[in-house]
Image (spheres, rainbow, N blue to C red):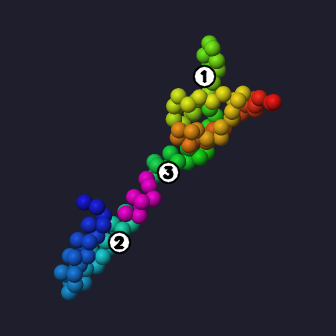
Amino acid sequence: MSEDSIIEKLHSISEMYSDNSSSNEAITQAISYIEELKEYHSVGTVNYVRELNDLYVGKEPLFVKRSFTNFYICPHCSTNETYNPVYSQAEHCSKCGGRLLWKHKERKEN
C-alpha cells in the first residue's frame, strides 16, 4: 500500500471521528508522519546519498598491467571500460558517471 493511499484512508477515518478531538488529533499526527516519510523516500536513503557522494568526490583510476599493454579501469564500477592516459584522460566514467582523478599528466602532445 502506498503512502498516498494510506493518507487518503486516514483522511476518511478522520472525517468519521470529527467529533472526537483526541482521535482526530492522533490521525492528523499520523498523516503528518506519513507525509514526512513520503518526502524522505522521494529524496533517497542515506546509503544512496553516500553512493552519489562517492561518485562525485572522485577516485584515481585503477592501473592494470598486461604483457601487451597497460591501461586503467574505473575505480567506482570496475567495468571493462578502459582508459589509456596517453591518449585520453576522461574526467568521468562513461558507464557509471563516476569522477576520475588523474595523478599522471602523460598526455600525448602533437
Residue at point 30%, 76% (across, down): 28
Q: CA distance from mark 1 to mark 3?
A: 30 Å
Closer to us: 73 or 36: 73
Q: CA distance from mark 2 to mark 3?
A: 24 Å
Q: Position of residue 74 (x, y in %)?
A: 57, 33
CA neighbours of label 3 inside 10 A, class few (<14), some (14 to 19), many (20+): few
- The amino acid pointed to by label 2 is Ser
Q: CA distance from mark 1 to mark 2?
A: 53 Å
Q: Position of residue 17 (x, y in %)?
A: 19, 81
Which residue is disc 2 drawn over? 32
State the image quarter where residue 41 is shown.
bottom left
- The amino acid pointed to by label 1 is Val
The magenta-colored residue range is 38-45
Residue at point 52%, 48% (across, down): 52
* Nearest to N terminus: mark 1 or mark 2: 2
Which residue is disc 3 drawn over? 49
Residue at point 63%, 24% (across, down): 71
- Along the horizontal axis of the image, is 22 left or right of 78? left
- Along the horizontal axis of the image, is 1 left or right of 85? left
Q: Marks 2 and 1: in contact by CB < 8 Å? A: no
Closer to us: 110 or 107: 110
Q: Secondary structure at mark 2?
A: helix
Q: Position of residue 36 (x, y in %)?
A: 39, 66
- The amino acid pointed to by label 3 is Val
- As drawn, the label of residue 64 is 1
State the image quarter where residue 22 is shown.
bottom left
Name of the residue lying farthest toward the right: 110
- Name the chief secondary structure element in magenta: helix
Residue at point 51%, 35% (across, down): 77
| Residue 62 showing in the rendered view | no
Q: Does 39 appear in magenta?
A: yes
Q: Secondary structure at mark 3?
A: helix
